[in-house]
Image (spheres, rainbow, N blue to C red):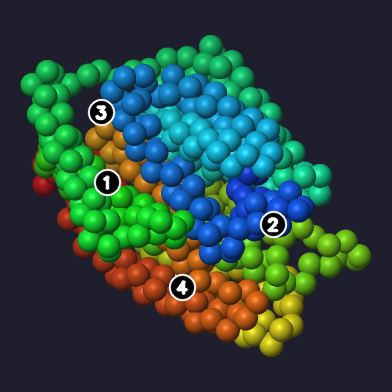
Amino acid sequence: MSRFARYPAGLPALFLVEMWERFSFYGMRAILVLYLIDAVETGGMGMQTSEAVAIYGIYSAAVYILALPGGWIADRFWGARRAITVGGLVIILGHILLAISGSTAWIFLAGLVCIALGTGLLKPNISTMVGELYPKDDVGGRDAGFSFFYMGINIGAILGGFVAGYLGEVWGWHYGFGAAAVAMLLGLLNFLHAGRGSLRGKGARPPQKDPAGAGRDRLVSLGLSAAVVLILGALIAAGVLDVRSAEGVAQATGVLIVTVAVGFFLNIYIAGELSGDEKKRMIVLAILFVAAALFWSRFEQAGSSLSIFAAELTRRDLMGFEVPASWFQNLNPAFIILLTPLFAWFWTRAQDRGWEISVFVKFGLALVLVGLGFWLLVPAAKVAMTGVQVSALFLIGTFFIHTCAELLLSPVGLSTFSRLAPERFTSQMMGFWFLAASLGNLIAGLLAAGMDTETPSELPGLFNGLFTGSAVAGLVLIALARPLTRWALSGNESLAVAEDTGRHG
């Protein structure tokens, strides 16, 4: 396959759709916690930090957990294209509600709900459509294509962070929320136009299962759903989970995500009529799910503990201009834009030269690197303990290391899930991938909930703990890479080759 064929005609259109959707999401994310903890007199909600980061975790988790039913709706009823269109409209409505909510809490919360629902419909299905552009055996080309698609995500993220962050912090929070609605409208119009051209025939409703298989699948789904409800209800009734506070709701949401993930996996594994090879690949995806959840629990400190660290413990004066704290989150997408061409070139170069780098090694290295980013902050936290604000270089270095880690995991994970998922469950498995991000986002909020920026004596311990847990898990995954690849993929990650080896080996 030529290098040009690795970037097919439909890829730029999907790149632009995702760019504008991410503008709306990350623009709002950059100011959400800052808005919630801002004083009522200056336009904020006046919440305690622990409540604000818990709400952030719940919202971020909801955005990604809803990708699972979003993928299910596409696979069963609408197809990816229609799900994306409806999702975009609901996101626009959500941002409009945020912009006009004023001090009315229920309108603001309704806006958050709409954004979460719309993103759940859009997010897994646009990734599915990217995967449709590539053959299964083009591992390097697919990784490179998803890397460039991922660059679109981060161009939108950096634009959203700058525009919505500046408008929110300087003009007023609701101006920032309103700018995100305009961005999503641009993305939706672009997608509708591309549907008549480069994306024609993509994202259609997939063929349905036979009635007998569908009935068995429905029974298993109902049984697992009932088990989820019973487990959650029992924990609340026993007092293990307290849903009377934002932190308690966040903990309950974490239990919900884990039980939903296990139930979803078992549903497809048991009732999905999978072949032996497909079941092995499902095990691979489950392992990557756990690794991704651990990664995002570290990485998504950007919107909670690192955001507060930037706002209250970092020197932000630049030649007389005070850099908005929300702008530090633009470092990650800026580094992604700079580094993506290098990573995409490397993936295609590696495949052309026959270098086989296991997805387990890529994920393991990502976990080690994201841990090292926090290890770099340990000396900064020790300085902050003395009451002195620290240099911004510490955060810049952390965001650079975290970006390298993200490029090893996130676009590679999108590519791998789109490639290894059973074809009739592709959108649902993309939702399963984003469920890992949901769990990681929620854990990130809970980890940051105890952060005290006025007396930050616990910060060195927090950052050391984040480093150790991540680095150990990454090294274990790297050590297991060869036996896992040999067992599940017949020693080769090219799906066509693996299947051929399985038949004739």
Q: Nearer the viewer, residue 443 or 198?
A: 443
Gap in angstroms between the C-alphas marked 2 and 3: 47 Å
Give the residue pinned by disc 3: 424
| Nearer mark to the viewer, of 3 and 4 | 4
Assess disc 4: are there few (<14), some (14-19) or many (≥20) residues with their C-alpha within 10 Å of its C-alpha: many
What mark, if any, has residue 466 been given in the picture? 4
Q: Report the amino acid beneath label 1.
A: Val
Disc 2 target residue: 38
User: Element at badge 4?
Assistant: helix
To which residue does mark 1 refer? 260
Give the number of callouts: 4
- Report the mark closest to the observer, 4 or 2: 2
Question: Of label 4 and label 2, which has the lower sequence position?
Answer: 2
Q: Position of residue 347 (x, y in %)?
A: 47, 49
Type of amino acid under label 4: Leu
Q: Is residue 254 left or right of residue 371?
A: left
The residue nearer to you, when weighing 247 against 421, is 247
221 relative to 20 in the view: left or right: left
Name which of mark 4 and mark 1 comes first in the sequence: 1
Q: CA distance from mark 4 to mark 2?
A: 28 Å
Please tell me whether mark 2 or mark 3 is closer to you in this view: 2
Give x and y (percent) for residue 174. Answer: 71, 40
Q: Quadrant of the N terminus?
A: top left
Q: Earlier in the sequence, mark 2 or mark 1?
A: 2
Contact between labelled residues 3 and 2, with CB atoms less than 8 Å apart: no
Q: Which residue is depicted at the point 80% across and 60% down? A: 323
